Image (tube, grey):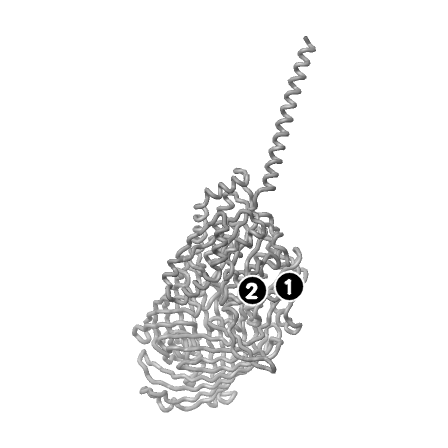
């Protein structure tokens, strides 16, 4: 009996053991089967078309693909599709890409403008003057000369900086198949007309070439090719992702904007758009037919250049909506790939450089520049600093480009952290003709033309010519020498002709014609970041005449020619973020000038001393509302002041007609003030939508012969209300002002930058 029970127990144990083996073995077989299926599953490729700002919809599409758990084995794109696709292939999540595009100043990125704080103090005013810059060559020897049109409106410096910063760690020549997700993008070679599939090289360069919109951005030169936006030949590269190995293609393309085309019917915009469509139509149609799941976000009424933040949010949302419309197809695709419902396939693999902010630098090398020119560049390069953050690197590149000496400034980081930093700069070989325009209801139309000629390859010697063509024209010829990091010296000559109108309490008193010749010697200018100090001497000759056609003749005593010798000391601190409607920074200037008629005295008495200052600073009130208080003062320390150095108040801008002119909102023209003038005003501006501003200005002015009796003299208020729209050619302003000085309403209209 005992033996029987024992054998029975052994049999039960054996059966249990065998059952356990069957279960374990079966699970292993099942898992091996799943593994084999995953190894052998069909590969999924994603194609992202070009479309400018419309391409932000790609971010929404990728978000939904991630959430559903669709594996992405290959990704290809053109233009903005190459931008989003390249970042995604590099390891950026959709949330990272979304955040990246949200924080960018796209108006800045799509231009070559340098933020004001990164421009040398000596060049900051030029940024707010010129609209067009045309290169030209002066013929020497066998070289041909003449004005030439640039290859594109913009060099793409700012957008390229973004690509370089975002692809740190992948600047070496690499195969794009080695990225976390294999990637390819399309460009077109202008010289051969061939489509160029870019699957290796420098990733930032490939993306930049793929979005080099003809006429807007300069092409990218690579080897013997001149590369432009691939959208002109293959805007939707399904054939490329098939070539890379994709069995199933999910594609994103934007439908033709029939409504927009209808609105622009007969215009140059319609013609351009249709030519663009015709060029790549055959490839577009065949690639659409070769797409397994086609996603077509309807982003109307947004277009290629709608880079404003509300538009970006809406476009991304349209991408999400369009993808969710295909959810059933995507779920079916996932199931056919045997992807577990609770275990989606991550599209992102690790990129160790994405979160790397502090870069360790072994060596810094500079290409494309002589050793002599390198000395000029060293002011922005700290060879001793071994660590640099991404933002500091961006700032350094911007400052080099902001110097105005270089056509382009590129860089690459070779190796792994620590890196070798290689700067690749292109010195401006041609000179440039810069043009600005301005119109206002006071002076009518004006054109400003400027050229800067580099006299040698050292970048230290400059010859500058500026002229204004208007009712009040002038010509400035300037020669300057830069030595070292901070020093600038030189000489300049200015001749101007003015038809001056002088008012007395709002009533026209007389007109005076003036030809002014000024020879200025700059002993030295020192620059310390945002600080500028200037020391110089000046000879000024005034020739007066009766203004042609005027019935308001000046007294005969006003027509005597005058010659003066002046000595000048002035300083400026300026870190404003912009000239028009600043939101950060501050501005302070002072000047001391000594005026004589024989180098040492004025009319055989003590020379005339003049002290002036100007200060203003914007403060944020709430949201997009800013308050800017301003204080301006000028004091002539002499009882006898020549008429051309007396204080003047009136007009919209300081120094518009005469250097000592203090602006006075709501005034109709210039009026003579006493020896001491003090003006304070408050400007309130509201940036209610992109590039749109409402503003008001309230000012108070007091003047008298002496400082200690200033507020015992005459005083008056002024006010204006206005609207401004910021355009690429400068601000459009519409305002209505009132001044207690003239005691009347003064409407004012202007367009373009002031000069």
Q: Is residue 126 above or below residue 96?
A: below
Is residue 23 placed above or below 617 in the rendered structure? Answer: above
| Near-viewer residue (96 or 57) | 57
Q: Is residue 682 visible?
A: no
Q: Quadrant of the C terminus?
A: bottom left
Q: How many marks?
A: 2
Up-down relation of residue 391 to residue 517 (above or below): above
Instruction: Name above or below for residue 451 compared with residue 217.
Output: below
Spatial CA span between label 2 and label 1: 27 Å
Q: Which residue is mark 1?
A: 422
For this orientation, the residue located farthest to the top is 1
**Residue plotted at (66% across, 64% down):** 364
Relative image position of residue 670 (x, y in whole percent) = 37, 79
In the drawing, does residue 90 fall left or right of residue 726?
A: right
Residue ID for mark 2: 189
**Residue 217 % position (x, y):** 51, 66
Q: Nearer the viewer, mark 2 or mark 1?
A: 2
Residue 134 in sight in this render: yes
**Which residue is depicted at the point 57% across and 46% down?**
43
Left or right position of 368 against 626: right
- Label 2's element? strand
Query: Residue 359 is drawn in which quadrant?
Result: bottom right
Of mark 2 and mark 1, the one earlier in the sequence is 2
Q: Quadrant of residue 209?
A: bottom right
- The quadrant holding residue 400 is bottom right
Looking at the rendered structure, the secondary structure element under dot 1 is strand
Answer whether labels 2 and 1 touch (C-beta < 8 Å): no
Instruction: Farthest residue to the left: give it.
Output: 744
Residues 490 and 100: in front is 100
């Amino acid at each position: 009996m005992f033996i029987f029970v024992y054998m029975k127990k052994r049999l039960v144990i054996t059966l249990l053991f065998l059952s356990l083996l069957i279960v374990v073995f079966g699970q292993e077989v099942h898992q091996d089967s799943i593994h084999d299926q995953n190894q052998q599953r069909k590969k999924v490729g994603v194609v992202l078309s070009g479309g400018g700002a419309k391409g932000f919809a790609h971010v929404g599409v990728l978000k939904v693909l991630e959430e559903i758990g669709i594996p992405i084995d290959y990704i290809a794109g053109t233009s903005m599709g190459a931008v989003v696709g390249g970042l995604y292939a590099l390891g950026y999540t959709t949330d990272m890409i979304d955040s990246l595009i949200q924080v960018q100043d796209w108006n800045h990125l799509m231009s070559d403008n340098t933020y004001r704080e990164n421009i040398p103090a000596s060049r900051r005013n030029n940024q707010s003057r010129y609209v067009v810059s045309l290169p030209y060559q002066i013929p020497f020897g066998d070289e041909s000369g003449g004005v030439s049109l640039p290859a594109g409106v913009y060099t793409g410096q700012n957008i390229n900086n973004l690509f370089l910063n975002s692809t740190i760690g992948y600047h070496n020549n690499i195969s794009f198949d080695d990225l976390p997700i294999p990637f390819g993008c399309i460009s077109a070679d202008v010289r051969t007309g061939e489509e160029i599939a870019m699957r290796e090289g420098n990733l930032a360069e490939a993306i930049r070439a793929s979005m080099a919109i003809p006429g807007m951005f300069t092409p990218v030169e690579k080897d013997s090719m001149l590369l432009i936006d691939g959208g002109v030949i293959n805007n939707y590269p399904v054939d490329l992702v098939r070539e890379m190995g994709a069995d199933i293609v999910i594609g994103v393309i934007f439908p033709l904007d029939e409504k927009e085309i209808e609105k622009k019917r007969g215009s140059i915009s319609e013609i351009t758009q249709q030519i663009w469509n015709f060029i790549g139509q055959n490839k577009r149609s065949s690639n659409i037919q070769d797409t397994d799941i086609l996603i077509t976000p309807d982003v109307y009424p947004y277009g290629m250049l709608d880079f404003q933040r509300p538009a970006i949010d809406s476009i991304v949302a349209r991408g999400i909506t369009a993808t969710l419309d295909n959810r059933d197809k995507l779920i079916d695709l996932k199931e056919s790939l045997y992807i577990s419902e609770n275990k989606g396939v991550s599209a992102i693999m690790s990129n160790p450089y994405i979160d790397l902010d502090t870069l360790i630098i072994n060596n810094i090398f500079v290409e494309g520049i002589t050793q002599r020119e390198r000395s000029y560049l060293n002011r922005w390069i700290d060879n001793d600093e071994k660590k640099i953050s991404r933002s500091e690197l961006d700032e350094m590149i911007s400052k080099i480009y902001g110097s105005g000496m270089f056509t382009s400034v590129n860089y690459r980081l070779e190796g792994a952290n620590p890196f070798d930093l290689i700067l690749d700069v292109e010195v401006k070989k041609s000179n440039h003709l810069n043009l600005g325009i301005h119109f206002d209801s006071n002076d009518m139309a004006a054109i400003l033309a400027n050229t800067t000629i580099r006299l040698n390859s050292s970048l230290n010697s400059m010859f500058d010519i500026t002229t204004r063509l208007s009712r009040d024209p002038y010509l400035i010829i300037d020669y300057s020498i830069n030595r070292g990091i901070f020093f600038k010296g030189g000489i300049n000559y200015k001749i101007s002709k003015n038809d001056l109108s002088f008012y007395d309490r709002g009533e026209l008193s007389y007109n005076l014609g003036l030809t002014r010749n000024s020879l200025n010697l700059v002993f030295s200018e020192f620059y310390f970041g945002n600080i500028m100090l200037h020391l110089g001497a000046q000879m000024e000759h005034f020739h007066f005449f009766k203004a042609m056609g005027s019935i308001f003749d000046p007294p005969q005593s006003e027509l005597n020619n005058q010659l003066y010798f002046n000595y000048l000391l002035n300083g400026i601190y300026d870190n404003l973020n912009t000239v028009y409607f600043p939101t950060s920074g501050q501005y302070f200037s002072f000047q001391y000038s000594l005026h004589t008629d024989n180098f040492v005295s004025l009319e055989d008495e003590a020379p005339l001393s003049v002290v002036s200052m100007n200060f203003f600073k914007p403060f944020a009130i709430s949201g997009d509302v800013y308050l800017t208080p301003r204080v301006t003062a000028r004091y002539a320390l002499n009882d006898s002041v020549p008429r051309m150095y007396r204080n003047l108040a009136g007009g919209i801008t300081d120094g518009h007609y005469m250097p000592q002119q203090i602006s006075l909102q709501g005034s109709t023209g210039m009026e003579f003030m006493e020896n001491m003038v003090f003006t304070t005003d408050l400007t309130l501006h509201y940036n209610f939508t992109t590039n749109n501003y409402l503003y008001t200005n309230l000012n108070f002015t007091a003047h008298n012969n002496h400082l200690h009796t200033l507020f015992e003299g005459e005083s008056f208020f002024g006010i204006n209300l206005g609207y401004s729209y910021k355009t690429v050619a400068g601000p459009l302003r519409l305002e209505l002002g009132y001044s207690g000085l003239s005691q009347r309403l003064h409407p004012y209209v202007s367009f373009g930058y002031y000069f």
